[in-house]
Amino acid sequence: MGNSQSPPADPLFVLASRAFTKQELDELRALFVSLSAQSQSDSRFVSPSVFQAYYGINGALCERMFNLVTQRRGDGMLTFEDLVVAKAVYEKGTPQEIEEFIYQLCDVSGDGLLRRSDLEAVLKSIQDTVFSTKNTEHGLSPHQDFVSIFVNAASFSERLGDSNENVMSATDFRVWCNAVPCVRKFLRGLLTPSEPGGVGRQVPRLQYPKTLRSDMLLMTREYAWHVGGLLSPDELEEWRLLYHSALNGQSFNTFLGSLSDAGGPTILVIRDKEGYIYGGYGSQPWEKHSSFYGDMKSFLFQLFPKASIFRPTGANANLQWCAVNFSSDGIPNGVGFGGRANHFGLFLSSSFDQGHTFPCSTFDSPCLSKASLILPDVIECWGIVAGGALGENPEPAKGTILERFKEDRNMLKLVGLAGSSD
């Protein structure tokens, strides 16, 4: 007796055990027995190397996770009690407990302060874990700016004593996690088995014409992982390039024609003449409307020089905009997201050679570029292939686009959404 399998007197373990059903505890015990056998520890503990191999975490983040899970003992031995206590907090704790655990996890130096260097180490570990060479597809190399674009989205507002260094406050960290849900999703899924499509590690397959070189694409696997932070696993299976301005020409009509069979969510990506990259996720097809439409699944995002996502706030229903061949100045022709007519969160005019981006309450988003007026350099649109072939709907829409448009507007009027203002 007296080994790690015996009922311990540790009150923390006893309390943590109550968070699990008997079956869950049995499964955890079976996992521990398997991993401890691989560690050749006579069923006493799991070694750091076996822990790393099973959970597939690379770099400083793995060392920090092992240190936290073993309650900072520094003895290199993960016991069954450690595993139960860690999972009780990390997976079944209150939102505040989980947030605190993730905050401590990102403090890789372990000094109680979240510095820029800590965040950089965490992101480098994520890059090495999710985008390892063996997972690279289509010759797309790891994004050179992966670490910097996510760090650039963070604030370090807490002054450290008399030094010139600022560190991340708990509020800063919470805001950052909200802006980069892909990172939070990854950090929440670290104690699940290592799989290519595991929690926070799923990256869409990017399908595009062979006539287009991969280095011509705006969307990289790293950017796709970021944008996919708010999407379901089904929506992260495959994304297909529907339109690229270098391939299809910078034409609004060609753009709409290329998307006519999409029948589902799309991702619009723009790089402007200033080098900024940003866009929007449209949950509804791009079809002619005389006012805003869409639902609360749409969002705006930035990709470069920083990576952030901006969700709908509920302030209004001005989500998607697609106006075609209208003659009224109050109905600007083009595609857009958020804000109000002529003052959008993001807008591309039907000429496709200019647009604008303003701060808007729809998504609580800032100006997405260096200046409000944007001059597009490259425009892409990707269709999400989920649950079947792209454009394949369980119940095909009936009638023309204009007929469906009238029906949609009547329904919106009934629920009071039509004509909502910024």
Image (cartoon, rainbow, N blue to C red):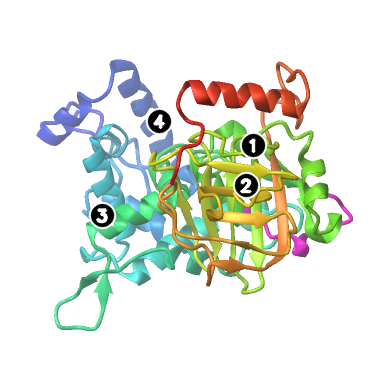
**In the image, which is nearer the foreground, mark 2 or mark 3?**
2
Q: Which residue is mark 1?
A: 265
Q: Which mark is residue 31?
A: 4
Q: Report helix, strand or loop for mark 3.
A: loop
Q: Secondary structure at mark 1?
A: loop
Closer to us: mark 3 or mark 1? Answer: 1
Q: Give the x, y percent position of residue 345.
A: 51, 54
Q: How many C-alpha atoms fall within 10 Å of the one at disc 4: few (<14), some, or many (≥20)?
A: some
Mark 3 or mark 4, which has the lower sequence index? Answer: 4
Of mark 3 and mark 1, the one earlier in the sequence is 3
Answer few, some or many: residues within 10 Å of disc 2's Cα (few below 14, many 20 plus, some between 14 and 19). some
Q: Is residue 269 left or right of residue 399?
A: left
Identified at 78% across, 36% down, the residue is 260
Identify the secondary structure beneath mark 2: loop
Task: Using the image, determine if residue 164 lies above or below residue 17.
Answer: below
| Mark 2 vs 4, N-terminal side | 4
- On whether residue 233 falls in the magenta region, the answer is no
Please give the residue where the numbered disc 3 appears in the rendered image: 75
Q: Position of residue 152 (x, y in %)?
A: 44, 68
Q: CA distance from mark 3 to mark 4?
A: 21 Å
Between marks 4 and 1, how big is the CA–CA gap?
A: 39 Å
Asked whether the residues under the numbered discs 3 and 1 touch, taking CB atoms below 8 Å apart as contact, a structural biologist would say no
The mark found on residue 331 in the picture is 2
